[in-house]
Image (spheres, helix red, strand yellow):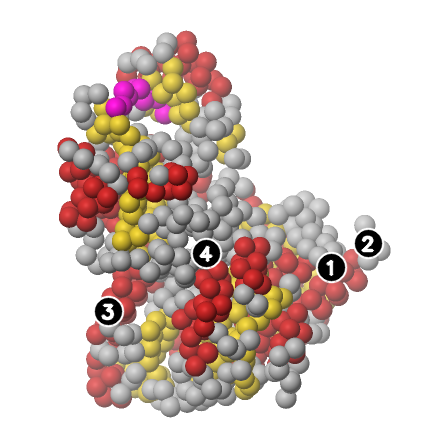
């Protein structure tokens, strides 16, 4: 389940002033969590770990109950059937089950393949032999965003919520900032193991795993690599039973070896289309479309529109505005059913907004759009932009504040259905 | 001189021969920025807007005394360019570039921290010391000289609030876009410290947004160290959890704990006496309670 907590970084918190890079998990409520986007499926994470020297159990994937049964019989029962989805919370949603007979494998797979976990339909299950463990550990390497540094976290108890453990048994959790230039030194990893209460063979073996996990984190530009749990089996082997890996989107250009198919990882079709045309689009449940040239401006527009109306989406164009981009943007926001108006809010800094205006009016003309379009456009080329809009039926906001623009929009909508 | 940048600062433009680098160099010069050199590897000997171009930062520093640099370079070239600039003795680097891998940002952050270099960004519109100089892409007609220091995680929102302040008779000393990524080089508390010391700044406006803990940390700093009044607006009151709102750093970490929500940020700031605006134009009303307009 892998709920990962990070060290606290509030000024005034004792962790912030920690000694020699040593940090603790915060005992108060100022714990930071991460949820980046480019997650890997558990099986993909497993493959990465295995490639870099962290042993993982054998597994097979199945898309149907019959296939799951066959794979389970090949692997040998009992097995664990696990939903493969790009979100946490699989255990709580019933997406993981240990089964003992071929019939049970089919039943469990049938049930799990019918689940939707936090909006993600389960299309595949992993079938993996059940492992008898005598001891569990939690290992993670992630990014402390505020301090801008990697942090390694180790706990002597796996399979639990680490942040809860940090509150109840702080002595069982060790964490440490890692120099990204030097990497995690073996001596540091061993010190963390001892700090978390590990003794005997566990110290060097778990320290090696933690070092390897840091390697994976660094090599693949990960935002999180987490193993929860790492187990020591009855045979004395160490195995990573659940891998959670998330890769930084902006580094994907240098990781062709990961062969990540981005589109299948975005379930919402409009959000996928946004990515295709090069904008950030988030679908919301209202009916006023928003087009903004910056993320902050887009969020502020949402805040203001939400006072009396409901935004249909958040959309940020980014810096590279062209006529074609804004044409595509209009096409995107108007694909959502029931949109009553479009509110355009753009600044010309690096953006040639007059070019964008040409794309907007081209779309409106070609598609004979008859809902109100209100545009607030300021900055470089503003006069030119206003003229293009005004000559083509777009309502130009005659004020520097977004609030006034939204009022204008509300007036236009008054009396309309 | 306000903070970080003034009309005498000798500015270098890295990536000066690119499409954006050229246009922005002209606009920065028009504003009065003292640009002394440009760098693009392989383009040494050329000129852009009358500014000499060099192959390396070391040459630009040796020949023209460049001391601050603004980056209009591709994300892939960032790490190498930053190391080169730091090694050549540049002490202020403004990184306009977007989509730099987080690991590269962390590496340069650590490298710079050992060498007394300040970086701003990445994914920032830059810095403008109003009426003197700008290193970045912000449209100059959004600002007027005055005594408000402004720190913003968003470029466009810094323009929106600045032009609203200007319309109401309040100008700015320095406006700093601190960058929209999840990991940035310079935090809000570090910028607050500079504004607190600046004799030309009477009040600071912080424009925050969902995600991260910058604003929460700012609240702690304000409580301990700030004597000047602070006004803030946090964007994204209704942002859904777990969705990245355009900026890499603008994401509410759903599922767990509620950190990064605008509500947690506003509560932390209110608790230490900061005036929190609910909407951008309300910033102007709150500023009026502390300053008289010119």
Provide the secondary structure element on which disc 1 rests.
loop
Q: Give the label on residue B114, or none.
A: 3
Q: Give the label on residue A161, or none.
A: none
Q: Give the label on residue B212, or none.
A: 4
Q: Nearer the viewer, residue A178 or B29?
A: A178
Q: Identify the residue at horizontal 18%, vertical 21% (top origin).
A: A235
Q: Are marks 2 and 4 on the same chain?
A: no
Q: Are marks 2 and 1 on the same chain?
A: yes
Q: Give the label on residue A416, or none.
A: 2
Residue A214 in view: yes
Rendered location of residue B222, percent (x, y): 48, 69
CA gap between label 2 and label 3 equals: 62 Å
> What residue is pinned by disc 1?
A372
CA gap between label 4 and label 3 equals: 25 Å
CA gap between label 2 and label 4 equals: 41 Å
Provide the secondary structure element on which disc 2 rests.
loop
Q: Nearer the viewer, residue A85 or A397?
A: A85
Rendered location of residue A225, percent (x, y): 31, 43
Q: Nearer the viewer, residue A380 or A112?
A: A112
Q: Identify the residue at horizontal 71%, vertical 69% (top origin).
A: A404
CA gap between label 1 and label 3 equals: 55 Å
Q: Earlier in the sequence, mark 2 or mark 1?
A: 1
Provide the secondary structure element on which disc 4 rests.
loop
> Which stretch is magenta?
A126-134
């Amino acid at each position: 389940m892998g709920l990962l907590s990070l060290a606290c970084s509030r000024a005034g918190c004792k962790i912030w002033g920690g000694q020699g890079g040593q940090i603790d998990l915060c005992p108060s409520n100022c714990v930071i969590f991460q949820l980046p986007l480019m997650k890997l499926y558990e099986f993909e994470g497993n493959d990465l770990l295995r490639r870099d020297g962290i042993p993982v159990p054998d597994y097979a994937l199945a898309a149907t109950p019959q296939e799951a049964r066959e794979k389970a019989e090949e692997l040998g029962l009992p097995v664990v059937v696990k939903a493969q989805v790009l979100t946490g919370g699989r255990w709580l949603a019933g997406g993981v089950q240990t089964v003992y007979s071929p019939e049970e494998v089919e039943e469990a797979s049938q049930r799990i393949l019918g689940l939707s976990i936090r909006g993600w339909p389960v299309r595949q299950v992993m079938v993996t032999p059940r492992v008898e463990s005598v001891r569990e550990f939690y290992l993670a390497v992630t990014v402390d965003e505020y301090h801008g540094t990697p942090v390694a976290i180790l706990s002597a108890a796996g399979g639990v919520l680490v942040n809860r453990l940090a509150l109840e048994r702080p002595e069982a959790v060790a964490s440490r900032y890692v120099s990204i230039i030097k990497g995690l030194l073996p001596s540091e990893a061993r010190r963390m193991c001892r700090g978390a209460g590990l003794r005997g063979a566990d110290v060097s073996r778990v320290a090696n795993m933690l070092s390897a996990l840091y390697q994976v984190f660094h090599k693949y530009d990960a935002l999180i690599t987490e193993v929860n749990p790492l187990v020591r089996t009855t045979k004395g082997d160490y195995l990573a039973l659940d891998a959670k890996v998330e890769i930084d989107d902006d580094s994907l250009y240098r990781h062709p070896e990961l062969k990540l198919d981005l589109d299948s990882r975005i379930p919402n079709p409009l959000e996928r289309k946004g990515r295709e045309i090069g904008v950030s689009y988030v679908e919301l449940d209202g009916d006023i479309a928003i087009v903004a040239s910056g993320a902050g401006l887009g969020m502020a527009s949402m805040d203001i529109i939400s006072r009396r109306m409901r935004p249909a989406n958040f959309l940020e164009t980014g810096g590279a505005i062209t006529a074609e981009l804004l044409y595509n943007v209009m096409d995107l926001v108007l694909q959502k059913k029931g949109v009553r108006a479009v509110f355009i809010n753009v600044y010309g800094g690096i953006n040639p907004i007059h070019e964008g205006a040409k794309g907007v009016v081209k779309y409106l003309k070609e598609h004979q759009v008859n809902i109100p379009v209100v545009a607030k456009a300021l900055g470089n080329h503003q006069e030119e932009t206003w003229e293009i809009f005004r000559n083509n039926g777009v309502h130009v906001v005659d004020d520097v504040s977004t609030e006034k623009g939204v009022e204008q929009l509300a007036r236009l909508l008054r009396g309309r259905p | 001189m306000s903070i970080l940048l003034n009309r005498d600062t000798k500015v270098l433009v890295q990536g000066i021969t690119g499409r954006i680098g050229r246009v922005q160099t002209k606009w920065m010069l028009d504003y009065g920025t003292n640009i002394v050199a440009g760098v693009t590897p392989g383009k040494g000997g050329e000129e852009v807007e009358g500014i000499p171009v060099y192959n390396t930062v070391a040459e630009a520093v040796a020949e023209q005394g460049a001391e601050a640099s603004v980056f209009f370079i591709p994300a892939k070239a960032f790490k190498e360019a930053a190391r080169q600039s730091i090694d050549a003795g540049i002490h202020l680097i403004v990184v306009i570039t977007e989509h730099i891998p987080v690991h590269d940002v962390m590496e340069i952050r650590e490298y710079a921290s050992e060498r007394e270099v300040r970086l701003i960004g990445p994914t920032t519109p830059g810095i403008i010391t109003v009426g003197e100089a700008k290193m970045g892409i912000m449209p100059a007609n959004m600002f007027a000289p005055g005594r408000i220091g402004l720190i913003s995680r968003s470029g466009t929102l810094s323009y929106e609030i600045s032009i609203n302040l200007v319309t109401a008779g309040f100008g700015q000393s320095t406006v700093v876009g601190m960058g929209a990524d999840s990991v940035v080089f310079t935090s809000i508390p570090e910028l607050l410290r500079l504004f607190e010391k600046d004799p030309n700044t009477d009040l600071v406006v912080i424009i925050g947004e969902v995600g991260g803990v910058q604003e929460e940390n700012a609240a702690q700093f304000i409580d301990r160290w700030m004597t000047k009044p602070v006004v803030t607006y946090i964007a994204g009151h209704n942002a859904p959890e777990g969705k990245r709102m355009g900026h890499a750093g603008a994401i509410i970490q759903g599922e767990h704990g509620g950190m990064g929500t605008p509500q947690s940020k506003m509560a932390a700031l209110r608790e230490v006496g900061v005036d929190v605006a609910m909407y951008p134009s309300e910033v102007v009303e709150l500023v009026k309670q502390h300053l008289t307009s010119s």
